[in-house]
Image (cartoon, rainbow, N blue to C red):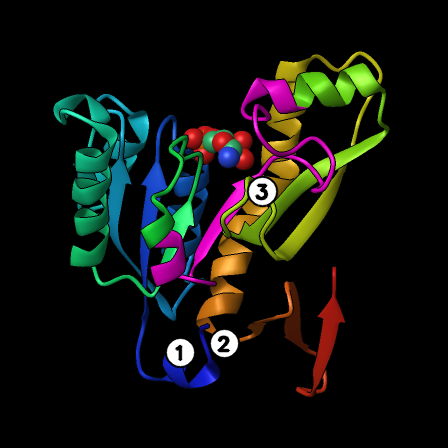
Amino acid sequence: MLTKETAAEGKLRVLVCVSGGGTNLQAVIDAKKAGRLERAELVRVISNKPGAYALKRAQEAGIEGICVSPKDFPDREAFHRAFLSAVDEASPDLIVLAGFLVVLPAEMISRYRNRIINIHPSLIPSFCGTGFYGLKVHEAALRRGVKVTGATVHFVDEGTDTGPIILQKPVMVKEGDTPEILQHRVMEEAEWVLLPEAIELIAAGRVMAADGKVSVKYQDEAGGERSVWHI
Ligand code: GRF
């Protein structure tokens, strides 16, 4: 677990894993450029897809981007070994899954316990778990007729979207929404806000996990601290 002590030693080394367009990666890059995330350093981006646009975003931001594709390895085990060594090589303090569509090797989850975060485009535990990715999440939300959806940042454990919840943000569903429209609103209003915020809070040592739950310590206006559960 990251502690205030860890954060105080220097910048948090952040590795981002991607599979696609990388708009969440871009939100983190933009936050950094805007002078936020002062305590964090984006050290490497790993994609499992050679043509992922996210790699271009990394390149343009001057971040090392590499591809480790399962197609270049004879079996899953060999891919997992190569992927894990690309992760270890970067010596990350925090691993961010930003639209990474690969099931992580079990060894990685235990090695980096409470140091891997994922962004999911719904309010967990709704519309999450196996099969809920990309547009499918929003299709299911519209099918069910929910009036509020949103996004969640959580630590990654052995299950699918089951790890301790760090941050959540609601987004209203509107009349006439299509899955595509809703997906974009959830990204704009929630995902691109939450992901940099979660990294910032972790880098500041303000995120503590215990017993499957997360407590986030915010500073109040007077500079004092207050704990918030399940914000
Ligand atoms: C996002 O909706 C994220 O919540 C999910 O995958 C999508 C990735 O989008 N995990 P992008 O590649 O960041 O644009």
Local crowd at mark 1 within 10 Å, few (<14), some, or many (≥20)? some
Q: Which mark is residue 161?
A: 3
- Whether the residues at callouts 2 and 3 have beta carbons within 8 Å, the answer is no
Residue 217 on image: x %, y %: 64, 75
Judge left or right: residue 182 versus residue 40: right
Q: Quadrant of the C terminus?
A: bottom right
Which quarter of the picture shows residue 83?
top left
Which residue has dot 2 on it? 205
Left or right of 144 on screen, residue 119: left
Q: Residue visible at 24% across and 40% down?
A: 80
- Marks 2 and 1 close (CB-CB < 8 Å): yes
Does residue 67 appear in this view?
A: no
Whether the residues at callouts 1 and 3 have beta carbons within 8 Å, the answer is no
Q: Which residues are magenta?
A: 108-137
Write down the residue under mark 1: 7
Q: Is residue 216 above or below residue 194?
A: below
Quarter of the view holding residue 144: top right
